[in-house]
Amino acid sequence: MKQGMRQEILTWSDVDHLIDVLLPQFHGHFDGMLMITRGGIVPGGMIAEALGIKHIFTAAVNFPHDVERAKLLAWPEFLQFPDDSLLADKRILVVDDVWGSGRTITAVKGRVEAAGGYPELCVFHYNPKRSLFPRISPMYYAAITDAWITYPWEIDRGGPDKVLARLPVTN
């Protein structure tokens, strides 16, 4: 998290609200869902269950972090991605938790398109101020934010600063 950046710590009730905002936005049938690891796994699972999507795939994307100047220009490495035949001629919902710079989700979008699929992008939180892609945005999003978001499944892991944020535990 950048110095001075506002942080929001969400509860599971907040996440339920985000799902409630997203669900009415979806129309028609998706042939499959592609969840971006790790951030898109929990949101994707919740959305897949709500929409009855049965064909679930994952994409693991890595951008090199070793050269400061090349960070934003680096070519992505796809560590895991479904075979093109599973995406071709299919309407695919691509899910991640946050659109910050947009690099990861747009790389996945491009790969789905190259396979002959029709990707539609979905995130819980969209940060247009940080986006590197002014002409591209998610088709579906639950909220616009400029804050660093910490989801309830991230609480015990700590954020990028390794500062643990704790919420009260209820039994």
Image (cartoon, rainbow, N blue to C red):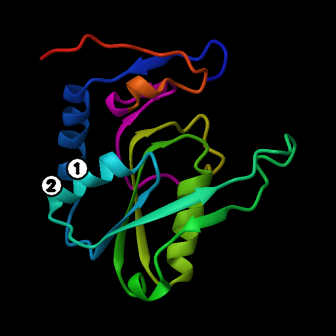
Query: What span is in magenta?
Result: 135-153
User: For the residues marked 2 and 1, what is the alpha-carbon distance in whole angstroms?
Assistant: 6 Å
Q: Secondary structure at mark 1?
A: helix
Picture residue at 84% right of the left edge, 49% below the top:
70
Q: Which residue is mark 2?
A: 50
94 lies left or right of 3 = left
Q: Which residue is mark 1?
A: 46
Query: Between residues 63 and 7, which one lies in front from this camera angle?
Result: 63
Query: Between residues 30 and 59, which one lies in front from this camera angle?
Result: 59
Query: Between residues 123 and 78, which one lies in front from this camera angle?
Result: 78
Q: Quadrant of residue 169?
A: top left
Picture residue at 33% right of the left edge, 24% below the top:
10
Residue 102, position as x, y percentages in the image: 58, 49
| Residue type indicated by callout 1 | Met
What is the quadrant of the N terminus in the image?
top right
Residue 126, position as x, y percentages in the image: 46, 40
Q: Quadrant of residue 107?
A: bottom right
Camera sees residue 135: no
Residue 150 painted magenta: yes
Label 2 CA crowd tier, 10 Å (few <14, some 14–19, many 20+)? few
Q: Secondary structure at mark 2?
A: helix
Label 1 CA crowd tier, 10 Å (few <14, some 14–19, many 20+)? some
Residue 31, position as x, y percentages in the image: 27, 77
| Residue type indicated by callout 2 | Ala
What is the quadrant of the C terminus in the image?
top left
